[in-house]
Amino acid sequence: MYLCQTNDGHIVIKLNERDQFPNMFQREAEGLKLLRSSTFRIPEVIAHGDYEEWSYLIMEYIDSHGTSIDQHEFGHKLAQMHLQTDPKFGLGIDNYIGSLSQCNKQEATWATFYAACLLIPLIKLAYDQNMV
């Protein structure tokens, strides 16, 4: 990740290997767009795409240095964000959690979604890598 100074201010540029993390930044841009409906300050995506063997995401830089948010206010905003509901659990598009692919298949219940898309894949990954 790079913080860059332009004539119009600061921007953030994220890079990764396109083939190792396909569609990572496209999915991140989609997720940020969804989060913009919350009352949190979410960075504006300027551009994302691929160039040669690289994927990139360019977005607004939000300088939070020296600022803080009241814990009560943060909790209130987080609760408001989670009041946005859908009849199903899951995003409907897969994305990433860090560098790991994350399934977001929609399920009828939270428990089914959590087990099928989050717990079981992580347990399998840990098992396959002899971590358990």
Image (cartoon, rainbow, N blue to C red):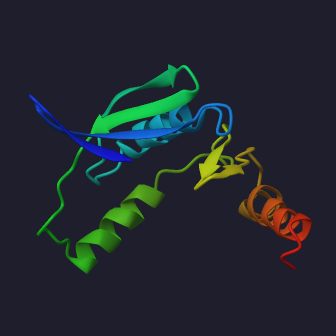
Q: Position of residue 13 (x, y in %)?
A: 35, 38
**Residue drawn at point x = 75 percent, y = 44 percent:** 105
Above or below residue 53? Residue 43 is: below
Horizontal side of residue 83 vs 47, given as left or right: right
Q: Nearer the viewer, residue 9 or 68?
A: 9
Q: Position of residue 58 (x, y in %)?
A: 35, 33
Which quadrant of the figure has residue 72? bottom left
**Residue drawn at point x = 9 percent, y = 28 percent:** 7
Q: Is residue 84 visible?
A: yes
Horizontal side of residue 49 vs 44, given as left or right: right
Q: Position of residue 73 (x, y in %)?
A: 24, 71
Number of marks drawn: 0
**Residue drawn at point x = 47 percent, y = 59 percent:** 82
Q: Nearer the viewer, residue 83 or 23?
A: 23
Q: Nearer the viewer, residue 42 or 57?
A: 57
Which quadrant of the figure has residue 17? top right
Horizontal side of residue 28 vs 66, given as left or right: right
Above or below residue 7? Residue 117 is: below
